[in-house]
C-alpha cells in the first residue's frame, strides 16, 4: 500500500459529474456502447481526464480489495456454535483470571492441572521446610499465599503460582481454598518479633494483593489492586517490600 | 443488542463475555468465510473460534468497545491467511496442488494460491484493524452499502436508487464520496 497525494478530482460541473458517472459505469462494465463512445470522446478532448480515469480505476481496485472485509466486519447474522462457548470461556478464565464457573472446566484438563499443582504443592512444602534452615538466622522472611477456591484446577492458578514465586525472591506459595483459613494464616506471625517478616497475599476473588509485615519492629500494611495484571501489581509489591528492607 | 461492557470484559466477567461472544461471532465467522470458503470451508468455524481466543488475549490493550470488531476482523483475516498458506505449503510439499486448482461447481477455475494474496495481507494486524475502524466510521449508511452494491454486487444506478430510496442523480455523488473516503484511509495501491 502506497499513499497517493494526487489532487482529488472534484465534480464542479455537470460535465465533471457526467464524466464520473460514465467512468464508473465503464469500470464496472455497466456502460452501453453509446456511453463508452461518449467517455472516449471526453477523454480525447481533455487528456487530463484520461489520467483521472486511471486514478479512478485504481480507487475501484482499492474498493474491491477492502469492501468485502469492511462488509464482513459489520456482519450481524450467525449464531455462536454451542460447543465453542466452553472453549472460549476457558480461554477467558485462563487469560483474565476470574473465578471459574467450575462446570465448564474440562475434566481431563482438570486432572492434568491437578497433577501439576500437586507437584507444585509438594515442592512448596519442601521449600517451606527447607528454607528456614537454609536462611541465615534473623534474615528477613517473605511468606506468600494465595486464595484458590477452585482447588487449583485452572491453568491460570499454576501460572500465578509461578509468577508469585518468580517475583518474590522464589518464596514458596501457600494455597488456601477457604478465606477463613487464609485469614488465620495471615494473622499468625512468628513468635520471634525481631525477625523482619512480610506476608504477601494474592486474592484473585477480590482482585488484590495484600502486603503486611514487621520490619525493625514496626508494622506495615498496604493493599495493591490488580489494576492492570498480576505481573505489574507484583512488581509494585516487590518495590514496596524492598523499601522495607527485605 | 447493546454493546458489551469493556471494563467487565477486561475483568474476565463470564456473563459479559457470553454476550460479547454472541455479538462478535458474526464478524469472526464472516471474515473467516470470506477468505477460507473457496478452499477450506470446513475450517471456517475453527479459525473464527481461534480468532476470538486471540481477541481475549488482547482485550486489555483495547481502549473502547468499538475497537473490538475491527480488531477481531483483523485477527481473523490474518489467521485465515496463515491457515491458507500452511495448507497450500503442505499440499505443495506433498505435490498435491491439483485439488486446490480444481474447477468450481459453476465451471469457473479457482485461482492459483498466489493470486489469493491481497494487499491487505501485508498490513500488520493492528494497522488493518485501525483502517477497518476508520472505514466503518467513514462509510456511514447508506454510503458503504451503495459502494458494495455497485462494486461487489453489480447493481446498476437505477436499482441502487430504488433500493436506497435516493434519486438516480445522487448515486454518483455517494459513490464518489465513498471512493474518496476509501482512498484517504487505505491509500492507492501500486500494482505489482
Image (cartoon, rainbow, N blue to C red):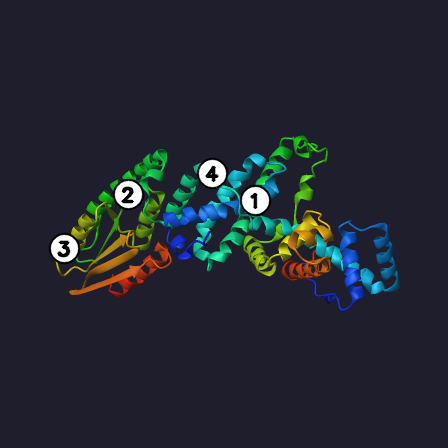
- Marks 2 & 3, CB-CB < 8 Å contact: no
The location of residue B109, given as percent across then percent down, is 72, 35
Residue B32 lies left or right of residue A29; in this view the side is: left
Q: Residue drawn at (59%, 44%), measured in percent from left and top? A: B81
The Cα–Cα distance between marks 2 and 3, rounded to whole angstroms, is: 29 Å
**Which residue shows up at 20% across the image and 55% down it?**
A136
Q: Quadrant of residue A197?
A: bottom left
Judging depth in this view, the residue of A105 and A216 nearest the camera is A105
**Discs 4, 3: same chain:** yes
Pinpoint residue B117: horizontal percent, then vertical percent. 66, 46
Q: Mark 1 and mark 4 in contact? Answer it, CB < 8 Å.
A: no
Say which mark, if any, is on residue A81: 4
- The tag on residue A150 is 2
Closer to the camera in the image, B101 or B42: B42
Q: Position of residue B85 (x, y in %)?
A: 60, 41
Residues at marks 4 and 3, CA–CA distance in whole angstroms: 54 Å
Amino acid at each position: 500500500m502506497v499513499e497517493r497525494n494526487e489532487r482529488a478530482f472534484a465534480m464542479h460541473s455537470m460535465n465533471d459529474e457526467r464524466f464520473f458517472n460514465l467512468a464508473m459505469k465503464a469500470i464496472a462494465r455497466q456502460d452501453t456502447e453509446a456511453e463508452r463512445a461518449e467517455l472516449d470522446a471526453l477523454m480525447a478532448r481533455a487528456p487530463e481526464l484520461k489520467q483521472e480515469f486511471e486514478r479512478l480505476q485504481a480507487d475501484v481496485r482499492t474498493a474491491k480489495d477492502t469492501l468485502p472485509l469492511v462488509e464482513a466486519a459489520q456482519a450481524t447474522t450467525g449464531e455462536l456454535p454451542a460447543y465453542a462457548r466452553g472453549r472460549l470461556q476457558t480461554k477467558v478464565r485462563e487469560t483474565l483470571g476470574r473465578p471459574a464457573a467450575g462446570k465448564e472446566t474440562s475434566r481431563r484438563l482438570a486432572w492434568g492441572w491437578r497433577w501439576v499443582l500437586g507437584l507444585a504443592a509438594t515442592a512448596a512444602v519442601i521449600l517451606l521446610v527447607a528454607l528456614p534452615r537454609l536462611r541465615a538466622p534473623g534474615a528477613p522472611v517473605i511468606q506468600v499465599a494465595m486464595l484458590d477456591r477452585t482447588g487449583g484446577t485452572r491453568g491460570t492458578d499454576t501460572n500465578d503460582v509461578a509468577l508469585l514465586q518468580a517475583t518474590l525472591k522464589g518464596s514458596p506459595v501457600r494455597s488456601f481454598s477457604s478465606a477463613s483459613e487464609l485469614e488465620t494464616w495471615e494473622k499468625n506471625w512468628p513468635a520471634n518479633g525481631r525477625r523482619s517478616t512480610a506476608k504477601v497475599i494474592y486474592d484473585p476473588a477480590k482482585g488484590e494483593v495484600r502486603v503486611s509485615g514487621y520490619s525493625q519492629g514496626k508494622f506495615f500494611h498496604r493493599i495493591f489492586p490488580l489494576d492492570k495484571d498480576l505481573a505489574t501489581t507484583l512488581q509494585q509489591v516487590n518495590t514496596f517490600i524492598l523499601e522495607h528492607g527485605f | 443488542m447493546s454493546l458489551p461492557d469493556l471494563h467487565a470484559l477486561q475483568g474476565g466477567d463470564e456473563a459479559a463475555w457470553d454476550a460479547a461472544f454472541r455479538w462478535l461471532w458474526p464478524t469472526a465467522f464472516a471474515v473467516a468465510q470470506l477468505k477460507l470458503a473457496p478452499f477450506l470451508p470446513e475450517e471456517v468455524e475453527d479459525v473464527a473460534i481461534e480468532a476470538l481466543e486471540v481477541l481475549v488475549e488482547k482485550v486489555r490493550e483495547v481502549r473502547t468497545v468499538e475497537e473490538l470488531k475491527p480488531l477481531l476482523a483483523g485477527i481473523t483475516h490474518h489467521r485465515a491467511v496463515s491457515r491458507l498458506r500452511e495448507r497450500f505449503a503442505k499440499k505443495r510439499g506433498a505435490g498435491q496442488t491439483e485439488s486446490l486448482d480444481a474447477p468450481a461447481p459453476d465451471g469457473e477455475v479457482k485461482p492459483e494460491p498466489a493470486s489469493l494474496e491481497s494487499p491487505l495481507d501485508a498490513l500488520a494486524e493492528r494497522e488493518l484493524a485501525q483502517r477497518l475502524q476508520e472505514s466503518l466510521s467513514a462509510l456511514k449508511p447508506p454510503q458503504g452499502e451503495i459502494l458494495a452494491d455497485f462494486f461487489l454486487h453489480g447493481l446498476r444506478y437505477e436499482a441502487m436508487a430504488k433500493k436506497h430510496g435516493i434519486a438516480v442523480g445522487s448515486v454518483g455523488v455517494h459513490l464518489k464520496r465513498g471512493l474518496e473516503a476509501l482512498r484517504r484511509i487505505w491509500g492507492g495501491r501500486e500494482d505489482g
